[in-house]
Image: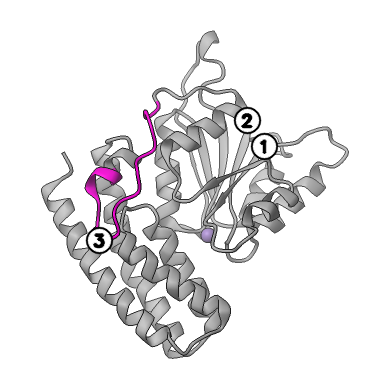
Amino acid sequence: MSNQSGRTKRIYTSKKRSANERRRGISILLVEDNPVNQMVALRLLEKQKHRVLVAGNGREALLALEKTSFQGFDLVLMDVQMPEMDGLEATAAIREKERGTGRRIPIVAMTAHAMKGDKERCLAAGMDTYLSKPIRAQDLFEVIENLAGVTADRLEDASPAPPPMEKVLDKNFILSMFEGDAELIQEIVGLFLAECPRQMSAVREAVERSDAPAVHRAAHSLKGSLSNFAAPGAFQAAQRLEVLGHEGDLSQVGEAFQLLEQQISLLQSAMVEFKKVGVM
Ligand code: MN
């Protein structure tokens, strides 16, 4: 568990709004356990003047909704895989509580597509739509516009093309993902560098214990952080371990973990350099 995921925080960003800005700055409940993903979504939403409460798992999200009698938020952004209570369970519980009230809060799944049928499961659980991780500014704002009727300040022209495989870290891709916001990129890279050793030890320990479910969980969590950067080598290495852990096939995890260590070390060096030089 991270420091951030255990608590909730409330950030108010809106001041008085004029009539034609009425639909600007809605109240969003962000449910996500991964601290890097939390920060990415939080900062992107804040840039659009939304008010955001962060919950670290489904249980925290339910508590936050109950506290406001299910009337405190305009929209829920819901991660799927989380400890304690996952996004599917939480959504089912929310829909159950809403039954007979005439209310139905829009819930947007944020899926990593680790498992086949993820999207279908999200919709079946009562979510309205889904976003693929990594969350891109443009997709996020489009979904909010469709579900809550708020228009974003500024949209990118197009989603960036994925980086070529041989790249350790694609700076241009990262810039376009975060709309050229150098300060935000520095903050997120810094958080990743701080979080990465802890996430790597979790994977290492699981591999050493030959604990397949733990390999799956730890690699999934690391992959989630990595997905915010254009770092295909490290991402794929983490994804390979995630799949091996999920399938319970531990014959190749040693080798897969070595590859992950190599890729992470390359990425860390590239990021340290990236931070030093800056992105502009
Ligand atoms: Mn998660």
Which residue is labeled 3 in the image? 166
Q: Is residue 168 magenta?
A: yes
- Establish whether ligand 1 lies closer than 8 Å to the Cβ of label 1: no
Q: Is 131 colored magenta in this rendering? A: no
Q: Quadrant of residue 113?
A: bottom right
Residue 3 seen in the figure: no
| Number of other residues with Cα within 10 Å of mark 3, as a class: few under 14, some 14 to 19, many 20 or more | few
Magenta stretch, main secondary structure, is loop
Q: Position of residue 83 (x, y in %)?
A: 58, 66
The magenta span reads: 155-174
Picture quadrant of residue 118: bottom right
- Estimate the x, y position of residue 250 in percent, counting from the top left: 49, 87
Q: Earlier in the sequence, mark 1 or mark 3?
A: 1
Name the residue that disc number 2 marks: 147
Distance from label 3 to label 2 (Cα)? 38 Å
Badge 3 marks a residue whose secondary structure is: loop
Q: Name the residue rendered at 39%, 37% in the picture.
A: 159
Residue 156 spot, x, y in % from top left: 37, 30
Q: Which one is earlier in the sequence, the residue at label 1 or at label 2?
A: 1
Q: Are discs 1 and 3 less than 8 Å apart at CB?
A: no
Tag 1 residue:
106
Q: Which mark is residue 141?
A: none
Residue at image coords 28%, 61%: 193
Mark 1: which secondary structure?
A: loop
Q: Amino acid at mark 2?
A: Leu
